Structure formats: structure tokens, C-alpha cells
Amino acid sequence: MEAVRRRRVTVTGVVQGVGFRPYVYTRATGLGLAGHVTNTPDGVVAEVEGAAAAVSAFCERLAADAPPLAVVDAVEHCEVPVAGGAGFTIVASLTGGPARTLVSPDVATCADCLAELADPADRRHRHPFITCTHCGPRFTIVTGLPYDRAHTTMARFPMCPDCAREYADPADRRFHAQPVACPDCGPRLRLLAGHPPRAVSAADPVAEARRLLAAGAILAVKGLGGYHLACDATHAGAVAELRRRKARGDKPFALMARSPGDVEHLVRIGPEERALLTGAVRPVVLLRRRPAAADALPAAVAPGSPDLGVMLPYTPVHHLLLGLPGDPPGPRLLVMTSGNLSGEPIVTEDDEALERLAGLADAWLAHDRPIHVPCDDSVVRICDGEPLLVRRSRGYAPLPVDLPLSVPAILAVGGDLKNTFCLGEGRRAWPSAHIGDMADLATQHAFERAELQLESLTGVTPALLAADRHPGYRSGRWARRAAGARPLVGVQHHHAHIASAMAEHGLDGTARVIGVAFDGTGYGDDGAVWGGEFLLADYAGYTRFAHLAPVPLPGGDAAVHRPYRMALSHLRAAGLDWAADLPCTAACPADELRVLATQLDRGLNCVPTSSMGRLFDAVSSLAGVCQRAGYEAQAAVELEAAALAAPAPPGPGYAFALRGPAGRPGGPLTADPAPVLAAVVADVRAAVAQEVVAARFHACVADLVTTLCGLARERHGLTAVALTGGVFANTLLSSACARALSGHGFTVLRHRRVPPNDGGLSLGQLMVAAARATEHHPQQGEAHVPRGTRPSA
């Protein structure tokens, strides 16, 4: 008779809220094993007992055959004494001790639930909260660990007998599905309208909401991670009114379509984009416009943008709003934008929605399931066949990034725009969901709540903090207040960008990379605004190898919002006249032009900047593409759009002048854009098309990157290049640089797991802070991180 054995099996990773315990139950009972399985703060723990061969078979493919939403990091098992007994059970979760498991992100409604939603014979027909083990809310409803219904915002909804029976049936798809619900046990929708808002008496709140949308109303719709503002995307009046009410400027709206087929006439959808659109994450996917979009959609949807941001429905409410088969006609394409005023955090609380969205919405489609964790939609685009995250949030958070080195418990607080923070310990880092612009007090409060929530989910208690060196950043001020007696490491902005790219590519920091960090702004070592940087960097330090020639930034934010000011500043620095026939001169009011001249002559409120983002603004204005920016990077986005429309190749190119260090042997090289600007002026005066000017400028920036990286390799022997910073969200530039660098034998590191913009900054801050901590206090058993070159003064 075969020997009986018993093993304790511990599974770590994303294994709670994804049907892992039911999977273990089914696998164990199928093999005739006795024992039990439970959730613990460490993950899922099972004990299995039976014939030795069956116990071994249970362990061998436990990870390989795991449920589709599970991410198994490790399976560990050990022999324990045989206990006897028969049957296999799921036992109550164990609590206590620090959390060390991973919570699943929210997941789009699965095909099985959608089939039930549309089936008149199913008891969940048209139920707005249909869910199962394989889909639905997770991260946004979790209030604690282990992941059980009692630790979610579903705790207030007792299961009806039918749901309880499904929940307890191992053969059912809803076996131990914590958010399980039905029309009898809730949650429930309600529709409110008017000012002040009053409940609308309607047998079907969603059907009435669809009628309002078709009539041109603007609705506040409660989703997984917050409220959206929605309107019919083909109703020109509704779109324009939403833009006016939201104070949106020209920033593009996201669209929600029922299927890819509903937008294929508007945008180009490749196989990678289609997989993103239809997968479990359902982010907003930035898709290149087709010419037909100009006639099919109001211009106010996405003025001046080369892309349309499209997502498919990811909750049952979304599917119902867009209509099920057989529903009366209604809008097939919705604007679906964050429920907030520009610059404020997304609204999650119902009372707050009625107050803060009162001036924005005509009606509210709400429900009584609380949102515990705010979470905006993620935004992704495809670049050379790979995803490039513009915003990492719903569907990705709170999944961790694996680190190439073990780090102490650290909190990195990120920047002030596109803020995210990052917690890390051991070989994992947890970037937060998108927080937003820290200039708004409500966003700062949202940051504090989110930070406490992520600490509780990860079990990380930071012993060290990291922040940007900028003395005025609100994130840095918060870190200084919160640090107390804990060390606080200041990290240079562009060093953090490069370290972020290194970390997500698994570099351990023993070799430096050539970091090309292009963005709009970052506090430099000399107090100037950097942003056109070539740094030789590891985690511990960097050397400034080259940079754009600095020019005055006249009036700070005024120059950001009025690109013609940057064009005029660059022309003055290049020794070029402010001729009246140039678009930037014509765009500047006469009074402002005189004041600007005095400001530049006297250096009043004119901090120097080497920003590549500001050079893009300047060329956009000089070429006549964009003179006023209503949202971040608008001038650069519209310049990219123009370049994409140019004939290929665009003809004779432009070129920067490279200059050696002035009076500083061994100092950084300078890339002077004066010849570029002179060539742009000549083309503008020769009536060369905007599109050609834009394409030639993109090409010359890619040439600059290739040339300077080649020089860095010649002088320092480095062969890996990290392309980072918000400018590299421009896929035309990113592709051109990567193609040229790869052709010259470089290894090119581009962001795939965190954004290249400031949304990825906190991961890099964490790695730099860890290197500094290890540098001074190496942990026993860990490799010492090389010091590298310290930042130049």
C-alpha cells in the first residue's frame, strides 16, 4: 500500500481575489486528497494529505495551471506530520501579522458574466453589479487583508440564500467570489437629476440615463475607482458644454465604445491595440486618427490631437449604458472623462459627487457600493509593438514591479505633476495608482489616504523616504514633514527618471548607462530648470555628459502656457530677430512683446532652462502649430501630429551645433539649437508646410541623440541607452531614436512597466535612495552597489 504523506504548501503572489482557493479545492479533491486551504497575510496556504504520488502531482503543476487572473510568485512546500481525516475544506482566513500577499487589480467584466447579463432567463439579467471569481472589483473595494468579503466594501451587503449557495458550491463559478451579488442582495443603482439633485423615479435607472444621454445631457456615472462625466460623443453641443463646464481647455476627452468595430472607421487598430482594448485591464488606448474622424466626431472631442483615446466598457453599468442587444437605440459612443474639475482628484464619495459635480453634471447615476480606493483609468499607447504606459492606474495598480536588488523599506513620494508614490522592500516595489497634480489641496489629501492604504496592503513600514530635490515641490514638503526622525534622501529629477528605466529592465547598477532624459522641467544641480539631459548614470550617482544650451524661461509658467514666449526666448538666444512675419511674433500681443523684451534684457524672472520639452514648444510656435497651451505638452502633442502628416522623407534636415565645455575641462558638452531655429525660420519664410518643419525637427532631435550617445560610447565605453522623461511619450521621436541607436549597436531601454513621464519618477527615486542607503550601510549578505560618480555641482 502506497505511503500517505502530508505537505504544507504556501503560494505567494496575486493569489487572493482571483479564485485561487476554489482552484486549490478543485485540484485537491480531483486527486482524492484530504486537507484544507486558507488565505493568510502571506498568501494562500494549503495542507494536502494522501497518497505520495497524488501529493506530488498536486504540487508539481500548481503554478502552471493557476486561474487566469493569478500571478504566482512562488510555491513553497514542506513535509508535515500526517493528521488523518477525510475531505478537503476551505477554512476561514487567518489574520494577524504584516500583509505580504498581493491584491489583484480591478478586472473587466468577463464573457460569462456578460452572457448572463444579456440573458432574460438568468436571475442576474441586467444586474449592474454582476461579477464572479474571474472579474469585477478588487483593489478599489479592499479595506484590509486577507481578501475576504468582510474586508471589502461588500461587507454591508449580506448574501441572499441563492448567492450564499453559489458562494459555497465548489462547482459554481462564484465559489468564494467575494463581491458576489444579485438583484436581491444589492448593491443598487439610483438616478438623480436637477439642481438640487432629486431621485428620479424610474423602473430602470440605466434606461432613463441612456435616454438623457441621447438628449444631450451630461451624466456623472459612478464607476469602479471614481465618478466619470459622460455624454454622447457625437452630440456636438453636449461635448462642447462638457468641455466648458470642466474648464478642460483643449485637452482631449477619452471615448468609450461598445466594441472595436464601433471605432474602426475613426482610428487605426492594430493587433496589439486590439488586445489592449479587449483584455482584462481595459485601459484608455491612444489610437491614431483616421481622416474620417474629422467628419464623424465633433472637433471638441480631441482638438489638435493625432490620437483618440478609446476604451471599451469594463463594468456591467458601462455595458448597460451603451446598450445590450435588443435595447432601444441610444448613444454608441460616449465621452467618458474623469469626474472632477481640471486639476482636482477624481470624485469617489456620493455626497461629494453631488456637491463638487453640481456645476458639471445634469444627472447622477450612482450606487450604494462604496469606493474605498480612488483609481483613475490607465492610459496606454503602443510604440513599436510594445505598450507604453502614459498613466499607470486602474487595472495595473497595485501590482508590484520586481526589483533587480533587495532594498530596505522605502517610501518615494514622486513629483508634483502626474504624481505617483512608490513603496518598496526586499525585491519588490509597489507604484501607486495615479494621484494627480499636487498643486490642489484635495489631491494632497488623496495622496495621504492612498499612501496609508498601500502601506496597509503591502505591510511595508518605510524606514527611509525619498523625494525630488526641488525645494518647492509639495510632495517634497510632505516628505519633510512626514519623515520625522527617518532619513530623507533628495534625488535629482532626471537621475530618478533614468533609474526608473534601469529598474524596470532589471539592471543591478553595477554598470552605468547613457541616460537621455527629455522632459519639460526638473530641478538641476545648478538651480536651473533642466530637461534636455544626457547623464552617465548608475543608481548611486551620475555625471552630466551633455545638455541643451540653456535659454531664459521668461515668466515661468507663463512661458509654458504661451509657447510663443519660449519661441521668442529661443530666437533671442540664437541671435535671431523677432520679425513680424514669424508666427510666434504675430501671436504675441504688442504690449506683452515689449514687456518680454525688457524681461529678457534684464533677466527678470528668467530662470535658465535646458528643457527639450520647452524647445518642442518653441518650434511648435515658430512653425505656427500652437501658440497657447491649455494642457500640459499641448504644443508638443500638436507638433507630433503635424510631423505624422508630413511626407516621408521630409527632405533636408536640421542640425544642432555641438560645443565643448566652456572653461571647464571635462565638463558637459552643449547642444546649441541656434542652427535649428535659423533653419526653421528660413523654412517658415519659404512657406514650407508646418508638417514638413515638424518632421524635420523630430528627425534632427533623433540625430542629436544618436550623435551624443555615440560620443559617450567613444569616451566612456558605455553601450546601453535609457530613453526617459515625458518627451519620450512621443512615439514618433521614441521610435526614431530607438531605431537609430539600435542600428548603431546600442542596447536601448524604453519604459514598458511604468510611464516615462513623472508618473514613473517615484520608482527611480526609490532605487537611488536604496543605493545611497546601501552605500553607507551595506546590508549583510548583499552585494555592495558601486558608488559611481557623484552629481556634478
Image (cartoon, rainbow, N blue to C red):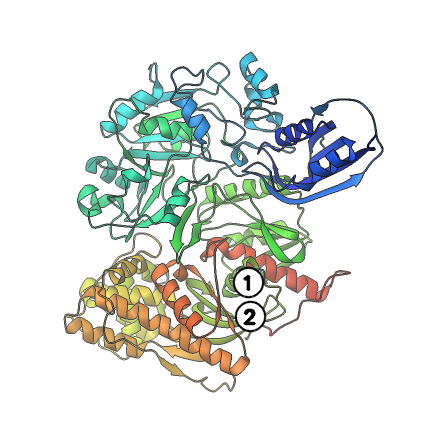
Q: Looking at the picture, which amino acid does disc 1 mark?
A: Met
- Quarter of the image for residue 529 reads bottom left
Q: CA distance from mark 2 to mark 1?
A: 10 Å
| Res. 481 in view | yes
Q: Residue at x 39, y 27 (%)?
A: 317
Question: Which of labels 2 and 1 is toward the front?
Answer: 1
Q: Quadrant of the N terminus?
A: top right
Above or below 218: residue 745: below
**CB atoms of marks 2 and 1 within 8 Å:** yes
Q: Which residue matches tag 1?
A: 502
Mark 2 burial class by Cα count in 10 Å: few <14, some 14-19, many 20+: many
Q: From the viewer's perspective, is 789 left or right of 194? A: right
The one of 410 and 171 positioned closer to us in this rendering: 171
Mark 1 burial class by Cα count in 10 Å: few <14, some 14-19, many 20+: many
Does label 2 or label 1 sit earlier along the sequence? 1
Q: Which mark is residue 537?
A: 2
Q: Residue at x 71, y 31 (%)?
A: 95
Above or below 63: residue 359: above
- Quarter of the image for residue 364 reads top left
